[in-house]
Image (cartoon, rainbow, N blue to C red):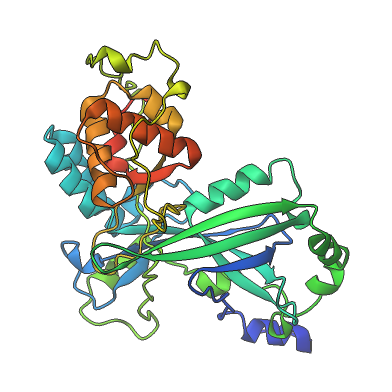
Amino acid sequence: MGYYNSKQLRDKMAGGHAREMAHGKNETKQLWIPRDQFYYLKKHFDIHNVPGVVCQAKSCHCPNDDVGARNDDACYICTFLQTLWAEWRATSDKKEKESILVRINRFTSEYYYVNAIDMNDPEEKFEAVKFTPSKMKEILLIIQNTPIETIKWLYKKSVAPMANGKERTSYSITEIIDDPTALKLNARMDELMDKGAQDGGMLDLESAYGKNQTSASLKKFLTSRTVPEDDSVDPEFSDDTTSVTEPAKPNAATPKPKTETINEELSLDDPIDDLSLDDDLSLDDGDDLSLDDDDLSLDDEPAIKMVELDKAFVKANTKEKDIMNAIINYLSDEKIMKKSGTYNTDVKALFAMVKVKPVEVPETFTKDSAAF
């Protein structure tokens, strides 16, 4: 109960809905973000594969809705995931570990929402824009020393076909500091902020995307055979499935790099930056190297967490033949690089490629490496 003016009523009545910015294939959005304020959302997917879950929903919100929260007992799904992590730690078989990680990576996704204006929108209305954790980390690094409201963000969505017939979706973000258009919008900050949500003003992201849910209510929801009327099925984000990482254990010893020796031709005593390609192992024209995000559009396939592989990683792991061969085989299978069959030549080719631009590989290839 209470008194509201017309602007407040419009905002209250629109509070449960958000204008989410449409992002077309291979489209670059020019964004202005006026506030250093982001809404964090954690969801679980594929929940019908969790023992004891009988509801018809495809996804659910996680009660651990604080970034980095570790209260597994508060969430039915998180509790189950800890049993999988226990299995992962208990086995020494690499293939079994990878199989368990594939299962784990299907269940959790994290997103960060923010109010932003598309600079090409003549109405200058605020819309909700979603970032994955990897893009959020890039943004946080940039705004450490630069006011966010003075930046124009170029946010690109790239979609490329994969060998299996599906599509790989990746995102990249680039900043333009002290952009003239961003500075003009910033000068009109009060005017833009004064608009109500219905009139194109700032959106209440928590009302639109959040969900007050206790451990008890989530368990009841998951173990009920019908979906309660007030618990609608959450939509799956097909192109933004990310993955969880193994929780850090206190006092865990840092893995030491292996000491396996290889051909003296690749000795780290030689400056690695001088590695050159004698053979033509470059990609054919038109091959795509734009793997800028950990987002894969895999529909019903498990989502594998991807990490960036750069020249520092290759330099630190040149003597790790098992790791490097696995990475080279993967990149060859994905048609990202050509494989010669000679270890030293392939490592040199990989190093030359990532010097130009890092590429992404499944995190499971880097678990025992010196750089990760």
Does residue 164 appear to the left or right of 209 in the view shown? Answer: left
Q: Quadrant of the N terminus?
A: bottom right
For the question of whether residue 83 can be seen, the reply is no
Residue 53, image x and y in percent? 20, 68
Q: In the image as oriented, which residue stretches furthest toward the bottom? A: 6
Does residue 338 appear to the left or right of 187 in the view shown? Answer: left
Q: Which of the pair 5/305 is nearer the observer?
A: 305
Q: Quadrant of the C terminus?
A: top left
Residue occupying the point 82% across, 66% down: 185
| Residue 24 to residue 41: above or below | below
For the question of whether residue 184 can be seen, the reply is yes
Residue 328, image x and y in percent? 27, 39
Does residue 175 appear to the left or right of 361 in the view shown? Answer: right
| Residue 298 to residue 324: above or below | below
Q: In the image as oriented, which residue stretches furthest toward the right? A: 187
Residue 61, image x and y in percent? 39, 65
Q: Using the rendered view, name the quadrant where residue 254 is placed.
A: top left
Residue occupying the point 87% across, 68% down: 188
| Residue 17 to residue 50: above or below | below
Residue 106, image x and y in percent? 27, 58
Q: Which of the pair 339/317 is nearer the observer?
A: 339
Does residue 29 appear to the left or right of 34 in the view shown? Answer: left
Residue occupying the point 28% across, 52% down: 334
Count of all numbered marks drawn on residues in the image = 0
Q: Using the rendered view, name the quadrant where residue 276 is placed.
A: top left
Residue occupying the point 46% across, 22% down: 274
